[in-house]
Amino acid sequence: MEMVELGGKQVEIDEDGFIQDPEVWDEAVAKDLAKTEGVEDLSDNHWKLVNYLRDYYLEYNMAPMIRKLCKQTGFSLKEVYDLFPSGPAKGACKVAGLPKPTGCV
Amino acid sequence: MDLITVTREEGLRFSIRIRNHVMTADMSVKDGGQDGGPAPVEIMGASMGACLATLVQAYCNTRGYNDGDVAVSLTIEMVESPNRIGGFVADVELPKDVPEGEKEKLKKMCLRLPIPASLRAEPRVDIEMF
């Protein structure tokens, strides 16, 4: 674990860059996390995915299955990877401030 | 079935030989390799994708659906304890002239293909050490 500056505050991340406390997440943190995944600017479509993942996590305390993510957001698998080249788990979940998924996305 | 041989090149990079075809497998840098090729789990995903693509393309060829090609996008859901593949998620793009009503039939056919059907039947894995 290490402390890094994200969104103007000190945030603890694991060895893969996932924040450890979902409570510290905000949009500024998300923007800086996105840069670590090679996404310089978050478009409306990025936010649609990120917000869906975040809402799902806050309700169920887990990440959704990939197929559910696609169906609920209306994005194909390819479109999800176009938005987050490292994928829904390593990319989108990280930006959404979720813990590193052990399964699902 | 022809023999598949896997021989070491360097580090965790291996050559896979099947008849006169050669592929490379390696682990990512994070997992101790040099990323000189896809990881074995990714090759398994590729096998699944190729299996789906070839069947669906053959089906379309037979029926004369030719307004575009078949393409597959696929990813793998990993699960833990033990670390393994929990699922394959595949989007299959079809030629535009495939009737809507045939898509569900095609989906069922895909599940009966050798790789999806084998995985669902839990094939025996018989290993000896020499």
Image (tube, coloured by chain):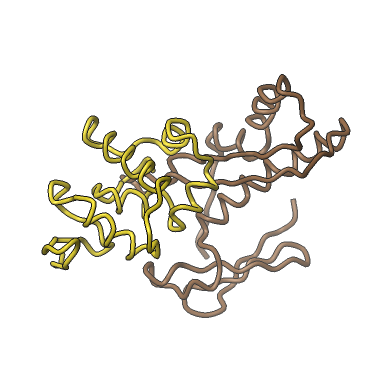
Residue B5 vs B9, above or below: the answer is above
Residue A6 percent across, percent down from the top left: 19, 63
Considering every residue shown, the one lying at the far bottom of the view is: B10
Q: Which chain is yellow?
A: A
Between A67 and B77, the residue placed more toward the observer is A67
The quarter of the rendered structure image containing the N terminus of chain A is: bottom left
- Residue lying at 70% horizontally and 22% vertically, measured from the top left: B105
- Residue lying at 53% horizontally and 40% vertically, measured from the top left: A76
- Residue lying at 33% horizontally and 59% vertically, measured from the top left: A34
Between A12 and B127, the residue placed more toward the observer is A12
Specify the quadrant of the image occupied by residue A2.
bottom left
Residue B23 vs B67, above or below: the answer is below
Residue B69 percent across, percent down from the top left: 77, 44
Residue B58 vs A28, above or below: the answer is above
Between B58 and A96, the residue placed more toward the observer is A96
Considering every residue shown, the one lying at the far front of the view is: A44
The quarter of the rendered structure image containing the C terminus of chain A is: top left
A92 left or right, relative to B66:
left
Residue B2 percent across, percent down from the top left: 75, 56
Residue B112 percent across, percent down from the top left: 66, 29
Tag count: 0
- Residue lying at 52% horizontally and 53% vertically, measured from the top left: B127
Considering every residue shown, the one lying at the far top of the view is: B101
A27 left or right, relative to B52:
left
Residue B62 vs A85, above or below: the answer is above
Q: Which chain is brown?
A: B
